Structure formats: C-alpha cells, structure tokens
Image (spheres, helix red, strand yellow):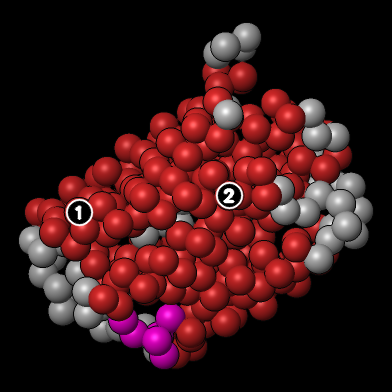
Amino acid sequence: MEDWALLVGLGMVAGLVGGLFGVGGGVIYVPVLGWWLDRQGFATELRVSMVLGNSLAMTLVTGLVGVWLWKRKGVYEPRTLLNMGVPAGLVALGLAWLLRQGAFYDAALFRLVFSSMLAMMLARNAWAWFKVGAVTPEGQGKDPSAGGYALLGSLGGLFSALTGLGGGAVMVPALQSLGMRNQARINALSMGAISVMALSSTLFYAMTDQGGLAPAFLLPTAAGTLLGLWPGIAMARHWSGSRVGSRNLRGGLLIFLTLVLLWINRDWILPGF
C-alpha cells in the first residue's frame, strides 16, 4: 500500500512536469522505475528492458491525455504531429527490437547512454537559453518542412528507444531553436508526437514474454499522472502567453534536467549515498 501511495505521488509529479515542459514525464519514470524494480527484486538482466518498456508505456498515457487537453484548449495540429510521430514510432520500434537481440545493452551501458543524452540535451537547452535569444517574439523564423519534421521525429524516436524518455527533450529545444516561440504550441506538438511514438513501443513491449510491462507499477503511476497533468498544462498555457514566461519555462526545464542528471549519477558523485 505504501508503494502504491508513493507511486501515485510520483506519477503526479511526472504529470505536472510533462504538462509544464512538454517532455512526457519520462525523466521521472526512468529513475523511479530503477528504484521500484530493485525494490521488487526483479532479475538484473530484465531491468533495462522493463525500464524502457514501462517508462514508454507511461509516456503514452501522458502523451494521449496531453493531446486531448491541448485540443480542448484549441492547440492541435494533427498533420504536423503525425509528421513527427510516425517516423519517431518506426525508429523506436526498430531499435527496441534490435536491443532485445542480445544482452549487450546492460544497466551500466544504459546509464551511460541515458546520462550522455540527457547531458547533451541539457547543454543544448542551456546554449539556446543563453545565446539564441529566448525572448524573441513568436513568428520570427519559419516552421520546418515536412522532411524536417520527419527528421526531428526520427531523432526523437532514437532518443526514446535508447533512454525510455518520450523524445520531448529532443523535440522541445529543437522546435524552439527552429523559430517557434509559443511554448503552448511547442508542448502540444511534442506531446502529440510522443504519443504516436510511445504507442508502437508500448505494443512491442506488451508482447514480450520477459522484461515487459508491469501493471503493479503502471496503474498507480498512471492514476497520479492523470491528476498532475491537468495543472501542468494549465500553467504552461498561462506562462507561454508572454515572452518572459516562455523563457522562464525553458529555464525551469534546465533546472529540472540538471537535478535528474545528478540523481541518476549519485552513486558516482556521492559514493554510498
């Protein structure tokens, strides 16, 4: 019962973060899954697969509900999100199959890849925040072409399949740097593409015989995510109405990603912690 209550609470945090920053909540799910799987005594060789599958399953919940909420608020571009989401889903599905063909992608390599990708996204966000003029008005710059959206989605799918994150950590800063300044639109597109990508990955992991989905984790965490997502999107919608608000959202994402990176590597930074 204590685990369920804790998972509901952590799900609320993930939903809040996903709605606020458009990143799908995977930055919460991955470290929490590592802790929960260890606590439940799952075999070490199954944990990477279970972290990836269950994190992306939760990301699917965040993405689908997020798309519905953004659509209710009038921020919905189905063609664009499919241009990103379908390539993302195909890349993520192919890589998920490849990763299960052997035991080479173990926990140590996963943490290295996860930390490296998170660090690169953090550096890219920081560079954009300090150098690219994050308060430039909306409308300056052009939207990517259909091919550009597909390439962006493919990169997001690669990122997701290797880390269990939804791809928003790639898509959000990339869309910002390409000229989009309305954070509400960026978040809506990101969450839409994430939901398409996560659907293919979730179906794949649901059909695996070992290292698949864990309902005991998914159900309470999903309940918490639904509770946290609504206020997260409402706050993002409110703050994205101003240039300063959009800049502050990006700054908040920087701080959050830094904290996650430190937590994932706490054994190296603070041995014995």
Farthest residue in the front direction?
1
For residue 78: magenta? yes
Please tell me the numbered disc located at residue 219: 2
Q: Please give the name of the residue rendered at 29% of the width and 72% of the height, measured from the top-left corner.
A: 70
User: Is any atom of residue 246 visible in this view?
Assistant: no
Q: Of the residues shown, which amino acid type is indicated by label 2?
A: Leu
Mark 1 and mark 2 lie on one chain; the one further toward the N terminus is 2
Location of residue 83 in the rendering, given as x and y in whole percent from the top left corner = 48, 86
> How far apart are labels 1 and 2 at the CA level?
25 Å
Please tell me the numbered disc located at residue 88: none
Location of residue 240 in the rendering, given as x and y in whole percent from the top left corner = 16, 61
Element under disc 1: helix
From the viewer's perspective, tell me whether residue 248 is left or right of residue 232: left
User: Is any atom of residue 84 visible in this view?
Assistant: yes
How many numbered discs sit on the rendered protein?
2
For residue 245: magenta? no
Q: Along the line of sight, which residue is nearer the eye, 270 or 3? A: 3
Location of residue 153 in the rendering, given as x and y in whole percent from the top left corner = 52, 74
Q: Which residues are magenta?
A: 76-81
CB within 8 Å, label 1 to label 2? no
Q: Along the line of sight, which residue is nearer the eye, 190 or 121? A: 190
Relative to 31, does residue 127 appear above or below in the rendering? below
Q: Could you tell me which quadrant the N terminus lies in?
A: top right
Please tell me the numbered disc located at residue 235: 1
Q: Please give the name of the residue rendered at 81% of the width and 66% of the height, measured from the top-left corner.
A: 207
Relative to 41, does residue 227 appear above or below in the rendering? below
Element under disc 2: helix
Q: Along the line of sight, which residue is nearer the eye, 262 or 205? A: 205
Q: Please give the name of the residue rendered at 27% of the width and 43% of the height, measured from the top-left corner.
A: 252
Q: Of the residues shown, which amino acid type is indicated by label 1?
A: Met
